[in-house]
Each structure stands twice: as structure tokens, then as C-alpha cells.
Image (cartoon, grey):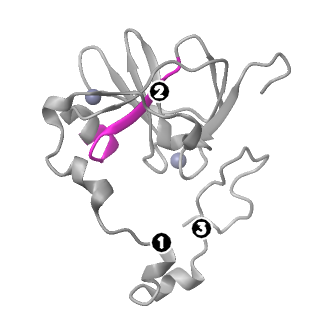
Amino acid sequence: MSLDNKPVYSGGCQCGAVRFRIEGALGTASVCHCRMCQKASGNFYAALVSVRDARLAWTRGAPRRFRSSSHAWRGFCEACGTPLTFEAPEGLALAIGAFDDPSVVPPTIQWGIEAKLPYVDAIPALPGEATMADVGSAPYLATLVSYQHPDYDTEQWPLEKGSKK
Ligand SMILES: [Zn+2]
Ligand SMILES: [Zn+2]
């Protein structure tokens, strides 16, 4: 919460070159199965939340944009490729997975269900394992050092030179 009791959200791309901050109530959160959202997110569907009347500020860097149709642009980090925005005439939406805490932005509706992939609804029923359960077949996991930006704002990033390839 900010000083005047408005909710505050932050987030950004995986590498940390682009960071955002939102002050105020967010609009509708949704997933979209349409083919354009699949491509733009490189995923089964895009999870997006409308910024609507909240105040959005890019606090580090800014997305690069691809004009995906005559009416819409898709914003992403040009350094690491993280999808960040969907920008259409009715406003801007942010990728929920890019939030520092995506758990507080639950989707309430699905769009584009004509293009929904046939296996998407079966995913929650698949067998599940924690990341480290696979350490036997992927021993590098035991010594892995993350170069991903942490889920909070930083004064300086990357912290030390040489941590980026
Ligand atoms: Zn990035
Ligand atoms: Zn879509």
C-alpha cells in the first residue's frame, strides 16, 4: 500500500532491464488462448491484467514494442525477451507472470477459447514434482546460480559485473 492507501504493485522482466510500478486498483485479470497471445507469450495462453485507471510507471528501462495487428502492440524486454504488455485502443495490460508477486492477480475470465489447446485443461491433472526432485537427472541444479532479477526493486542491477553473459 502507498501512503494514500492505494495498492502498489511492482514487477519487471527476467533480466531486470525493464521494471514497472503500478499505483491504484488494477482492472480485469484474464487469460487469452487466442493464437496471437500464444505466439506473443511463447506459451499455451497469455495471462494479462488491465492497468485501467491505475498509474503505471516504467521505473527502469521500457519495453520494446512489436505491432502485432493494426490495433495492438506487444511490449517485451529487448534484452531478455520477457513478454510485458498488450497495448490496444482500450488500454494497456501487463503480463501477470512479470509481476513480483503474481499470486495477488488471479484471473477471472478466459478469452479466445476458440483457439484453446486441446491439452490445456488436462495439465492440472498431470503428475507433479518439485524442481529439485529432478536433481538426479539434472545435477547442475545443485550448483545453479540465478541471474534472474529478484522479485523486488533494486538500486543497482546486475549487482556485480560479470554476472551477465
Ligand atoms: Zn529483460
Ligand atoms: Zn489473445
Kind of residue at disc 1: Ala
Q: Between disc 2 and disc 1, whose residue precedes? A: 2
Kind of residue at disc 2: Val
The residues tagged by marks 1 and 3 sit, at their Cα atoms, a distance apart of 17 Å
Q: Nearer the viewer, residue 137 or 143?
A: 137
Question: At which x and y percent is residue 39?
Answer: 25, 41
- The answer to which image quadrant residue 146 occupies is bottom right
Question: At which x and y percent is residue 16?
Answer: 61, 48
Residue matched to label 1:
130
Q: Secondary structure at mark 1?
A: loop
- Circle count: 3
> For the residue carrying disc 3, how many other residues have a C-alpha within 10 Å: few (<14), some (14-19), or many (20+)?
few
Quadrant (top left, top right, bottom left, bottom right) of the C terminus: bottom right
Relative horizontal placement of residue 85, taking residue 45 as reference (left or right): right
Image depth: mark 2 or mark 1 in front: 1
Kind of residue at disc 3: Ser
